[in-house]
Image (cartoon, coloured by chain):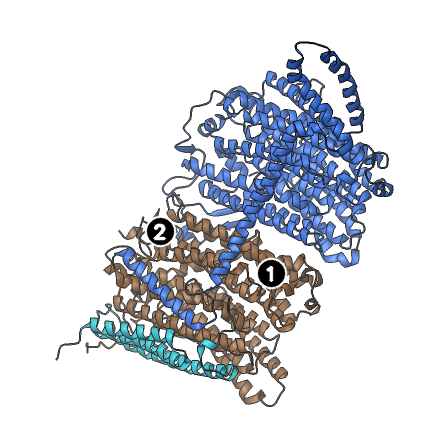
Chain colours: A cyan, B brown, C blue
């Protein structure tokens, strides 16, 4: 068997992806792009979980598939979030006639 | 791939299903209401008729769920040995204990009131979806309270939150409603991502997702109490706290609160402020105490790194920010939103008290008491906000002018609720605050006093909060009536107000009635499920740990136990 | 604890007004103005019940400390009381017995809050006083408020107030005290803002509520510290534990010249705290250690609450504004009963206060006394004048308590309640007749309102401290305590000077008020023409009050040194053997007291009565021969001139000018100083204290506004701030845990 990629590399990549996603949420004005960025953040967590599952030390007595199941659930949740997100973006677009999150600022203070 | 031992998975027994019956009923009832709307009523009847029938159906379902939940509490319905054994339930993902049984009653009770309030006005065309989503968010909420495991917790939390995103945006044709929903979704998803990233780190550090097992693993691997010297622990802890901080609306994760509270339909706001906050705080307490208890604080050094200090600071900042920002608000809903941030701060004081108090269960009981009574008071005040928004068409505090003499009953109830929120004895809000703050003072153990600064900040803040609540009282009783006052109060609002006010006064005059059961719930809340012994087959995850968890606070019956693991040494 | 059946008398007396309140709330529409009679009847029933209770208590009205006054270490007898406990709240002691049953040493006991009622001599006396005054004021209000649109609400509020006030007096649990304390505060708030159509009234109500919250903040801290230290809320239990000899030494250091031993710096050991420990049989006593500083904090905290309620400097600012309420309310709540609650609580908790705290109380009392009196001198609104006078008199009581004159301070509370409520009701009559509060436009009402004028004169005399009126006896008792204190502690002589100054000013301003309203010629014909005596239903209460204001201070015998009857009754409830005043000091006090009050009276007479004209002329004519005589050649004339004549001339000129300008030189020469001080006090009040309060308010609003600036409404800002906060937290935590 070939040598595995070290755990730390995964973690660093995941952290980078996470920060990129967060940065995207902060900077993108198109709501669709914001949703994509959130997707990045969630997937960074998935990467983390899978890396830990595959390469980390499991708790004694822990079930064999925890990480995979967790990831599957997260993917499902993320899908739901995006579905709702796109629906809400459509509603906003219809009401505000604009697809720019900066425009949605009627409530403040 | 590691070799996988084959472990038989266990199909939940009938008593387990029975225990979950309120939740299952609500999940099913959501589908039922939706189908009733889509297949039977939509396009055949007027909107108002549809709304009435769907509302009534939902109310029946919620009441039935409430009845089931109360029935489960009835002595003898569930064998007590089953309850007290704290067995692994649903393969260890859901707590099967007194706390779950009791707290789900409270949660469903909130749902009943919110449904009653929603039936009062027709503010959306999507009636079926609205009630279905209310049910499903309640399902998520209760599973979140009961979750004993991070995956379940996360999914339950998302079920609740995503349902509420949609509920927020459901008000037909309202610009602010859709804006609030999108903001809520973006902020909430970002916060969820932070939370999940934290969970992934916790999973990585411990190799498990079960709260109790995480707690044990952290104890075994710890070098110090608290998070001193371990930056990965610090990172994971902060990320998890960010997730919960978002849900409970604590500074600096609070910014969605005013906008969402203002924009969402008022019944939904009431639901967010009562139910969602209730569930989030309980889940937070469970995670912090059962899983991350080791990271609380170094025994004997209250200033050492750990979540106790972080939460103390967040609590102080939340209270101060919330109260100050509420001072100048003219908009009733926004004022309540900021005051809700402040109340999160008070509640965080209670959470800190649980972390360090020498009487954990009393402290937990105090926080639960505050959550219940605060939830009721919030429902009542938002009922008035809803009345303002829908019947008067305004959100301004000034529109309440002179209500006290024109509509004495609702105004008096509102006054009671506001006084309770200030913390005037003998109302329930006063006892909640007093008990939590006293437990925080009690934290030093040995009769000493600790966290004095935090309690002083909290007391100062309750003085400040009096300023803006009194403004509402002044509007009610000391101002000339405005034109809006002629509007009548629908019965849904009156019911909610009266129930909330009566409960506030009743639980204020006799706090023991609520405190005793909640104190009992506090005990089982802080008791993690023990690994299955010979009584049951080993479950699919095959935990084989020893039976006693030293870190388990409720079992730590050692004298002078100021911090989580005094006895572990 | 044993229960005495007599307690039920008092429970009934407390709850009858509550029933009237409930009736008022529920059946207001049907009963209409009958509510006034129901409320009056209810409080009258309470009065009868407390009278019965009082008669039953008479055999126990003997001081338990009479013999022990000379010995520091005498066993402290607990004053006799009727008591009863009702279970109300029990937290923690009933939780699952297997898990949390054993009280852990050092941790707090379960929180039990019984509703305990304790009726001792002080309660008995105050019950009669409060219910009597309240009855009279209810009766009075029936006519006074007759034309008000919210007539029935007024009596409903009054009933709620009576309930809360009586409950406050009866409760032994500090917790219950706090609750009723808030309740009376709320009633006060509602009644100050009763005529809410006017904005100033609303502001006054708010001010009262908020200033009181500031005091309650301290109260809560005190409450918390007491509970964590003693594990109980029972006042009598705490007092009993504080009666330990070691602590008493520290305490008595203040009131005894010799008791300087004891170590208050360390831990104070309190005995007889029963706790069951594991392995030991029940009843094993673990001494409870309460740190001295905790006692100081608790004492200061409780006193802060009292300062708010009793309008003591610097929290007195709400009281003058509270005069915005209807006058009967001012008489009942803001003169006789509620504002005295702070003094009452200080008295109740007397053993709690360490000597530093007592000194603090004394100084606060003295400062309030002087500020109140000096400001009252320059007031032109007679109701505000009375309000400042109340501040001053409450300061007197606090001073008395602070220097250890326990019964003196509380005795003054009782006498003051009678004469001050009389003054207010009289003022109400005047207002009823002339519809103005400005003294400058009054005068000469004596002939038009003879009954009111006479009764007010009684109150004025009592207030000024003229012998044979009740105020004289109580003020004299306080002065005696102060003098005795100063004899032990010469460093605090200022505490003698200030009350003397205060007494002088009190006599001066109170007579000034009476003269300006009732004496001389009407200054405004228009007003005087319409003035008429109040109806019988309004004069009867003040007549009864006048009788009490006269006799309530009398001793059994006319011997000058005999203790007044009421003071002796109150003394029977004394929680600690407090200071005993020696005969010599008593004589000195009487001397000072008589002289000072007479001087003040005379001064006022000279300046403001109708005799002023006569006096001026007589002085001038008397001086003429003197001047001629001096002018005719004495070598000493310059010296005399310097020492006597210039001042006398000054007086003469001043009084002469007063004829023409209404302001006299003497005021400029001698009383200008007074006025200066008063003005300063007034300005201090207006700008520093009020300004501070307003400043804090604006600062808070400003901070809130600043805080809301980050709420831009843009989701990207929110997420950015969230990220920044996370980053900041992470960096902070990283460096912190490293």
Q: Are marks 2 and 1 on the same chain?
A: yes
Q: Residue at x 28, y 53 (%)?
A: B568
Per the image, label 2 sits on a secondary structure element best described as loop
**Residue B546 in view:** no
On the image, the x and y values in percent for residue C530 come to: 86, 43
Q: Is residue B555 left or right of residue A6?
A: right
- Residue C329 seen in the current view: yes
Q: How many marks?
A: 2
Residue B468: mark = none
Looking at this view, is B47 or A66 the one in front? B47
The image position of residue C581, as x and y in percent, is 58, 21
Query: Which tag is nearer the camera, tag 2 or tag 1?
Result: 1
Q: Is residue B93 left or right of residue B386?
A: left
Q: Which mark is residue B501?
A: 1
User: Which mark, residue B557?
Assistant: 2
Q: Quadrant of the N terminus of chain B?
A: bottom left
Residue C674 picture location, percent across and down: 64, 31
In this view, C596 is above or below B262: above
Q: Give the answer, above or below, for where B123 lies relative to C416.
A: below
Residue at 41% across, 72% down: C716
For marks 2 and 1, give the CA distance. Answer: 38 Å
């Amino acid at each position: 068997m070939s040598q595995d990629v070290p755990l730390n590399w995964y973690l660093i990549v995941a952290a980078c992806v996470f920060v990129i996603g967060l940065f995207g949420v902060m900077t993108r004005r198109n709501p669709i792009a914001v949703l994509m960025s959130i997707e990045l953040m969630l997937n960074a967590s998935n990467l983390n979980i899978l890396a830990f599952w595959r390469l980390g030390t499991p708790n004694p007595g822990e079930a064999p598939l925890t990480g995979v199941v967790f990831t599957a659930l997260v993917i499902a949740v993320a899908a739901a979030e995006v579905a709702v997100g796109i629906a809400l973006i459509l509603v906003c677009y219809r009401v505000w006639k604009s697809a720019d999150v900066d425009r949605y600022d009627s409530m403040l203070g | 791939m590691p070799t996988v031992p084959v472990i038989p998975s266990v199909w939940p027994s009938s008593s387990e299903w029975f225990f979950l019956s309120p939740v299952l009923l609500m999940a099913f009832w959501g589908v039922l209401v939706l189908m009733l709307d889509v297949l039977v009523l939509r396009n055949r009847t007027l909107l108002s008729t549809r709304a009435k029938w769907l509302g009534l159906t939902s109310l029946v379902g919620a009441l039935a769920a409430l009845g089931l939940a109360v029935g489960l509490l009835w002595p003898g319905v569930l064998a007590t040995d089953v309850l007290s054994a704290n067995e692994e339930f649903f393969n260890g993902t859901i707590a099967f204990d007194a706390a779950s049984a009791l707290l789900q009653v409270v949660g469903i009770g909130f749902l009943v009131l919110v449904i009653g309030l929603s039936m009062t006005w027709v503010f959306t065309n999507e009636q079926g979806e609205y009630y279905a989503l209310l049910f499903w968010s309640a399902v998520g909420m209760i599973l979140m309270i009961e979750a004993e495991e991070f995956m379940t917790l996360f999914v339950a939390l998302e079920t609740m939150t995503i349902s509420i995103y949609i509920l927020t945006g459901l008000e037909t044709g309202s610009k602010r409603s859709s804006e609030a929903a999108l903001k809520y979704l973006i902020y909430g998803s970002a916060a969820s991502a932070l939370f999940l990233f934290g969970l992934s780190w916790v999973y990585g550090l411990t190799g498990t997702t079960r709260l109790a097992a995480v707690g044990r693993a952290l104890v075994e691997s710890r070098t110090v109490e608290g998070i001193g010297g371990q930056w990965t622990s610090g990172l994971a802890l902060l990320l998890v706290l960010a997730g919960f901080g978002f849900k409970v609306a604590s500074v600096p994760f609070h910014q969605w609160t005013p906008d969402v509270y203002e924009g969402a339909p008022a019944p939904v706001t009431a639901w967010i402020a009562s139910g969602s906050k209730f569930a989030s705080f309980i889940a937070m307490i469970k995670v912090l105490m059962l899983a991350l208890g080791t990271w609380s604080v170094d025994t004997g050094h209250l200033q050492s790194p750990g979540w106790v200090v972080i939460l103390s600071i967040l609590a102080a900042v939340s209270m101060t920010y919330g109260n100050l920002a509420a001072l100048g608000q003219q908009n009733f809903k926004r004022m309540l939103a900021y005051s809700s941030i402040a109340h999160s701060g008070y509640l965080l004081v209670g959470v800190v008290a649980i972390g360090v108090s020498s009487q954990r269960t009393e402290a937990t009981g105090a926080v639960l008491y505050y959550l219940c009574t605060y939830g009721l008071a919030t429902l009542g005040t938002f009922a008035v906000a809803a009345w303002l928004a829908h019947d008067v068409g305004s959100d301004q505090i000034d529109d309440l002018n002179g209500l006290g003499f024109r509509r004495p009953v609702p105004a008096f109830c509102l006054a009671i609720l506001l006084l309770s929120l200030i913390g005037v004895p003998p109302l329930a809000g006063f006892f909640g605050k007093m008990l939590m703050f006293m437990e925080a003072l009690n934290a030093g153990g040995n009769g000493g006093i600790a966290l004095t600064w935090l309690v002083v900040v909290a007391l100062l803040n309750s003085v400040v909060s009096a300023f803006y609540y009194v403004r509402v009282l002044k509007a009610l009783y000391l101002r000339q009536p405005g034109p809006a006052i002629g509007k009548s109060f629908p019965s849904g609002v009156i019911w909610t107000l009266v129930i909330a006010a009566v409960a506030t006064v009743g639980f204020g005059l006799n706090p023991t009635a609520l405190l005793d059961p909640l104190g009992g719930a506090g005990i089982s809340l802080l008791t993690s499920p023990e690994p299955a012994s010979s009584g049951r087959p080993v479950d699919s995850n095959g935990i084989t740990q020893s039976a006693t968890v030293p870190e388990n606070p409720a079992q730590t019956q050692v004298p002078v136990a100021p911090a989580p693991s005094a006895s572990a040494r | 604890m044993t229960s005495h059946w007599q307690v039920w008398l008092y429970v009934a007396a407390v709850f009858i007004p509550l029933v009237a309140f409930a009736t008022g709330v529920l059946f207001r529409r049907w009963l209409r103005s009958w509510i006034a009679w129901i409320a009056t009847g209810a409080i009258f029933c309470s009065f009868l019940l407390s009278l019965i209770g009082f008669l039953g208590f008479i055999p126990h009205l003997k001081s338990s400390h009479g013999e022990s006054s000379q010995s520091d270490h005498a066993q402290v007898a607990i004053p006799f009381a009727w008591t009863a406990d009702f279970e109300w709240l029990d937290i923690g002691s009933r939780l699952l017995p297997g898990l949390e049953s054993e009280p852990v040493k050092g941790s707090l006991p379960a929180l039990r809050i019984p509703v305990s009622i304790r009726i001792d001599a002080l309660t008995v006396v105050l019950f009669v006083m409060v219910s009597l005054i309240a009855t009279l004021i209810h009766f009075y209000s029936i006519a006074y408020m007759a034309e008000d649109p919210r007539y029935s609400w007024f009596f409903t509020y009054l009933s709620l107030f009576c309930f809360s006030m009586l409950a406050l007096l009866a409760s032994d649990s500090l917790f219950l005290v706090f609750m009723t304390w808030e309740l009376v505060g709320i009633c006060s708030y509602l009644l100050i803002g009763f005529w809410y159509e006017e904005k100033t009234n609303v502001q006054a109500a708010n001010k009262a509520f908020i200033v009181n919250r500031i005091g309650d903040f301290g109260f809560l801290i005190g409450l918390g510290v007491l509970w964590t230290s003693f594990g109980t809320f029972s006042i009598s239990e705490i007092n009993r534990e504080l009666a330990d000899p070691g602590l008493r030494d520290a305490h008595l250091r203040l009131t005894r010249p010799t008791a300087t031993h004891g170590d208050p710096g360390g831990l104070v050991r309190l005995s007889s705290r029963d706790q069951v420990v594991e392995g030991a049989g029940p009843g094993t006593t673990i001494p409870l250690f309460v740190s001295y500083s905790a006692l100081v904090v608790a004492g200061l905290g409780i006193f802060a609450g009292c300062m708010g309620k009793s309008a003591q400097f610097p929290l007195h600012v709400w009281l003058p504004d509270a005069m915005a309420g209807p006058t009967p309310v001012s008489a009942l709540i803001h003169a006789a009963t509620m504002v005295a609650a702070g003094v009452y609580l200080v008295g109740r908790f007397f053993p709690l206060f360490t000597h530093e705290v007592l000194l603090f109380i004394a100084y606060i009392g003295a400062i309030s006394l002087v500020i109140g009196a000096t400001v009252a001198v320059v007031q032109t609104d007679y109701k505000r004048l009375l309000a400042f006078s109340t501040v001053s008199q409450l300061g007197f009581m606090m001073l008395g308590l602070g220097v250890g004159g326990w019964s003196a301070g509380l005795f003054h509370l009782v006498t003051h309640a009678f004469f001050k409520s009389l003054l207010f009701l009289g003022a109400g009559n005047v207002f009823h007749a002339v519809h103005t509060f400005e003294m400058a436009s009054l005068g000469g009402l004596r002939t038009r309102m003879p009954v009111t004028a006479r009764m007010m004169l009684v109150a004025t005399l009592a207030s000024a401290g003229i012998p044979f009126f009740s105020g004289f006896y109580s003020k004299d008792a306080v002065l005696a305590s102060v003098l005795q204190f100063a004899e032990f502690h010469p460093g605090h002589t200022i505490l003698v000077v200030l009350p003397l100054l205060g007494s002088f000013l009190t006599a001066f301003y109170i007579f000034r008020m009476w003269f300006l309203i009732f004496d001389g010629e009407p200054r405004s014909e228009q007003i005087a023409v319409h003035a008429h005596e109040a109806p019988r239903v309004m004069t009867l209460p003040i007549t009864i009050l006048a009788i009490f204001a006269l006799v309530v201070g009398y001793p059994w015998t006319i011997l000058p040194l005999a203790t007044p009857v009421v003071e002796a009754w109150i003394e029977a409830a004394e929680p600690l053997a407090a200071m005993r005043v020696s005969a010599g000091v008593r004589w000195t006090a009487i001397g000072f007291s008589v002289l000072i009050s007479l001087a003040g009276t005379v001064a006022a007479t000279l300046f403001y009565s109708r005799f002023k004209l006569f006096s001026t002329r007589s002085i001038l004519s008397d001086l003429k021969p003197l001047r001629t005589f001096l002018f005719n050649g004495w070598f000493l004339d310059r010296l005399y001139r310097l020492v006597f004549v210039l001042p006398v001339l000054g007086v003469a000129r001043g009084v002469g000018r007063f004829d023409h300008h209404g302001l006299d030189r003497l005021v400029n020469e001698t009383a200008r100083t007074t006025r200066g001080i008063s003005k300063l006090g007034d300005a201090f009040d207006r700008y520093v204290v009020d300004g501070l309060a307003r400043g804090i308010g604006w600062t808070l609003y400003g901070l809130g506004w600043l805080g809301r600036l980050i709420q831009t409404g843009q989701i990207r800002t929110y997420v950015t701030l969230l990220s920044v906060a996370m980053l900041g937290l992470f960096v902070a935590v990283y460096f912190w845990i490293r």
